[in-house]
């Protein structure tokens, strides 16, 4: 880990400092109502003991950034996002603010984000469920609201000692280990996996990852998002694929000689591709592929939490 964490026992739990993630603080008496009109999830469900996944979209329904939200007991909200997008998000939120009584501050220098994950449970966070928020290790822990297997986030002040984590038995991990864990679960995160203004929210599986509420009122991009769900159908999905060597971003994927998608992100032997699920069905391609990427064999790694192409609740 970047901070030299050294575990004191053989626990299977791991902790990784996420340099790719940053935090914005939105405060003021109208903070929640302000964000309620912008983001895809219902902030009425947000509380000091309950966090949310959400997203900011363009008016055309394209994904600007995926977010994790946590409410502070003393008031105000923390918005976690891709670190490289924090300045842009701060600018966009400031433009949307108009006369709303809110403050928007870049907290990257004061708050550090950690991922806590592992197959053997999370020491010190017994019973933590997805979406639950509680004080822990000198900071705030959030059971990842997107998927139970993702573990938890920990938000620590940069000056806070890491000794409580060490004493609990967390083993050091690199951010690449965390990305491998996410990739194995089929969950995309950040601008590298989700290029801004490239994908529709539903193509990025945000509904299945508990980041979209279809019952709330209007928000930016809501009309097209609802239309895609109820009328137009969904013909593309972002899913992990594997190949060796892994193709470059933008490489076209083929099945039966037909284009069925392209690589969106890549790192090591795996990455994410945006696939035409209607064409996968037409070509009889199963959930594990096979595909071809510029002469290289590739396999689909369809997540078990995502409905199969053509199945009820899936696409098309």
Image: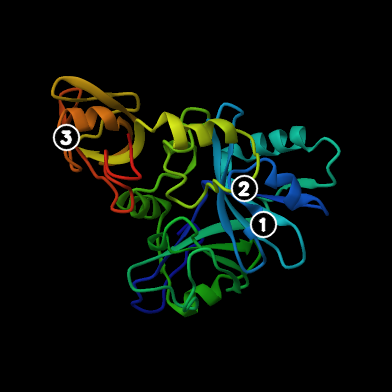
Q: CA distance from mark 1 to mark 3?
A: 41 Å
The picture quadrant where one finds residue 219 is top right
Q: CA distance from mark 3 to mark 2?
A: 36 Å
Q: Residues within 10 Å of mark 3 (few under 14, many from 20)?
A: some
Considering depth in this image, is 232 or 2 the residue closer to the camera?
232
Position in image of residue 112 (x %, y %): 59, 57
Element type at mark 2:
loop
Q: Residue at x 70, y 42 (%)?
A: 37
Position in image of residue 242 (x %, y %): 23, 40
Q: CA distance from mark 1 to mark 2?
A: 9 Å
Q: Residues within 10 Å of mark 1 (few under 14, many from 20)?
A: few
Position in image of residue 180 (x %, y %): 33, 51
Residue at label 3?
285
Q: Residue at x 57, y 26 (%)?
A: 60
Residue at label 2?
216
Query: What is the count of numbered marks?
Result: 3
Position in image of residue 182 (x %, y %): 37, 52
Q: Are marks 1 and 2 in contact (CB under 8 Å)?
A: yes
Q: Earlier in the sequence, mark 3 or mark 2?
A: 2
User: Viewer-nearest of labels 3 and 2?
Assistant: 2
Considering depth in this image, is 83 or 273 the residue closer to the camera?
273
Considering depth in this image, is 278 or 54 the residue closer to the camera?
278
**Position of the C terminus by quadrant:** top left
Element type at mark 3:
loop
User: Compared to 206, does 291 lie above or below?
Assistant: above
Horizontal side, residue 15 vs residue 131: left or right = left
Q: Residues within 10 Å of mark 2 (few under 14, many from 20)?
A: some
Q: Residue at x 41, y 36 (%)?
A: 203
Q: Earlier in the sequence, mark 1 or mark 2?
A: 1
Whether residue 265 can be seen here: no
Residue at label 1?
44
């Amino acid at each position: 880990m970047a901070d030299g964490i050294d575990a004191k026992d053989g626990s299977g739990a791991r902790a990784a400092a996420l340099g790719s993630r940053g935090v914005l603080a939105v405060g003021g008496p109208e903070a929640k109502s302000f964000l309620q009109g912008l983001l895809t999830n219902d902030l009425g469900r947000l509380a000091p003991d309950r966090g949310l996944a959400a997203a900011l979209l363009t008016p055309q329904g394209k994904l600007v950034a995926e977010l994790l939200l946590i409410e502070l007991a003393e008031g105000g909200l923390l918005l976690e996002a891709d670190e490289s997008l924090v300045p842009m998000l701060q600018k966009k939120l400031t433009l949307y603010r108009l006369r709303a009584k809110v403050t928007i501050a870049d907290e990257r220098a004061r708050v550090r984000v950690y991922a806590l994950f592992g197959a053997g449970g999370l020491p010190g966070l017994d019973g933590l469920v997805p979406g639950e928020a509680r004080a822990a290790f000198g900071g705030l822990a959030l059971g990842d609201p997107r998927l139970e297997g993702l573990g938890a986030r920990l938000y620590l002040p940069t000056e806070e000692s890491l000794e409580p984590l060490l004493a609990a038995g967390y083993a050091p991990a690199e951010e690449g280990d965390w990305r491998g864990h996410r990739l194995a679960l089929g969950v995309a995160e950040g601008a590298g996996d989700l290029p801004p203004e490239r994908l529709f929210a539903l193509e990025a599986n945000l509904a299945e990852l508990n980041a979209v509420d279809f019952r709330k009122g209007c928000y930016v991009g809501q009309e097209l998002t609802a239309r895609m769900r109820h009328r137009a159908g969904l013909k593309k999905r972002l899913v992990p694929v594997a190949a060796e060597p892994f193709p470059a971003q933008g490489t076209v994927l083929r099945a039966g000689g037909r284009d069925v998608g392209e690589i969106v992100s890549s790192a090591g032997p795996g990455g994410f591709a945006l696939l035409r699920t209607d064409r996968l069905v037409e070509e009889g391609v199963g959930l594990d592929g096979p595909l071809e990427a510029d002469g290289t064999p590739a396999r689909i790694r369809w997540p078990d939490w995502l409905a199969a192409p053509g199945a009820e609740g899936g696409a098309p």
